[in-house]
Image (spheres, grey):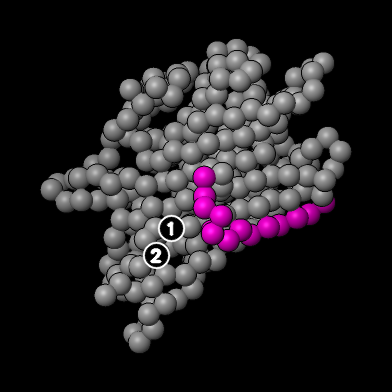
């Protein structure tokens, strides 16, 4: 990890730690939230896909948005998030064929403008983060910033590179990779991130949002980063399904795992 200052790097790491916690701040209030609370720690998660009217057979490009907030009734705030996993319904497929890739070294460190200049063609989404940052001998203060998501690789495997940049209390740049895994069962794709130890004792995440939506052309065809259909049985035009299962693992062993249930309608 590289940051403009040690203090700033710690603040950014704490904030981006949520990044994939599935992303809430920019979601419309009409998107229903799932709330889980345990041991004084509350996680509120929202998510949606657009459009919701999809073909019964085959898949078309879609956009997916997730968002999350962490709060606590315990003294000293919520524990630190150590791992975040988002498992997406198997009907949603990632397609990166022909999509340019971004390298971590090209955007770490960098401002938002510099990251876009280096990897705009590989961008697959964006959002924002918020955190409460603790600095020795000072009261906790809120920190916010921009998140950009880029198509990349991690140890030779597909990944989302989440670039975060904030300017308060000091300019800070940080990149957190999310490994993309294939799985079996209801959920076919997992996005997983482990948070760095650099967060130390100086900060904790309060919220993050991200919308993943990218259209691109490859071999003369229009493609989407995310693609899905609505496989409702014949004679049924609307069907409910679990959109995503999230898992928030905190320091001390606490785990909260909300599931987002949504519905789709058959197009045509």
**Which residue sits at x=36%, y=26%?**
116
In the rendered structure, are the residues bearing label 1 and label 2 in contact, judged by CB atoms less than 8 Å apart? yes
Residue 215 sits above or below residue 173 on the image = below
Q: Which mark is residue 52?
A: 2
Q: Quadrant of residue 54?
A: bottom left
Asked whether residue 145 appears in the rendered view, the answer is: yes
Q: Quadrant of residue 18?
A: top right
Q: Indicate whether residue 127 is drawn in magenta.
A: no
Q: How many marks?
A: 2
**Which residue sits at x=37%, y=40%?**
124
Q: Position of residue 92 (x, y in %)?
A: 40, 59
Measure the C-alpha gap from mark 1 to mark 2: 6 Å
- Magenta segment: 26-39
Q: Position of residue 83 (x, y in %)?
A: 63, 42
Residue 163 sits above or below residue 33 on the image = above
- In this picture, residue 174 sits left or right of residue 60: right
The quadrant of the picture occupied by the C terminus is bottom left
- In this picture, residue 137 sits left or right of residue 12: right
Q: Residue furthest front?
A: 29
Q: Position of residue 238 (x, y in %)?
A: 42, 77
Q: Residue furthest left?
A: 220
Q: Secondary structure at mark 2?
A: loop
**Which residue lies under the disc numbered 1?**
49
The quadrant of the picture occupied by the N terminus is top right
């Amino acid at each position: 990890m590289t940051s403009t200052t040690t203090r700033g790097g710690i603040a950014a790491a704490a904030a981006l730690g949520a990044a994939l916690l599935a992303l809430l701040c920019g979601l419309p209030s009409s998107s229903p939230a799932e709330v889980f609370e345990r041991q004084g720690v509350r996680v509120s998660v929202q998510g949606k896909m657009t459009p919701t009217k999809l073909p019964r057979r085959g898949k078309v490009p879609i956009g997916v948005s997730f968002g999350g907030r962490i709060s606590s009734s315990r003294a000293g705030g919520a524990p630190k998030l150590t791992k975040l996993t988002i498992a997406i319904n198997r009907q949603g497929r990632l397609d990166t064929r022909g999509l340019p890739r971004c390298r971590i070294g090209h955007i770490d460190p960098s401002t938002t403008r510099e990251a876009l200049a280096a990897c705009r063609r590989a961008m697959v989404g964006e959002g924002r983060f918020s955190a409460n940052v603790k600095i020795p001998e000072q009261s906790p203060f809120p920190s916010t910033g921009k998140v950009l998501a880029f198509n990349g690789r991690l140890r030779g495997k597909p990944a989302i590179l989440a670039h975060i940049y904030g300017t308060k209390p000091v300019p800070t740049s940080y990149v957190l990779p999310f490994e993309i895994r294939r799985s079996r069962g209801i959920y076919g794709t997992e996005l997983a991130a482990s948070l760095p130890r650099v967060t130390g004792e100086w900060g904790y995440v309060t919220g993050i949002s991200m919308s993943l939506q990218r259209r691109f052309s490859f071999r003369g065809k229009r493609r989407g980063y995310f693609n899905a259909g609505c496989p409702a049985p014949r004679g049924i035009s609307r069907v409910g399904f679990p959109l995503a299962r999230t898992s928030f693992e905190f320091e001390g062993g606490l785990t909260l795992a909300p599931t987002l249930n949504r519905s789709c309608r058959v197009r045509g």
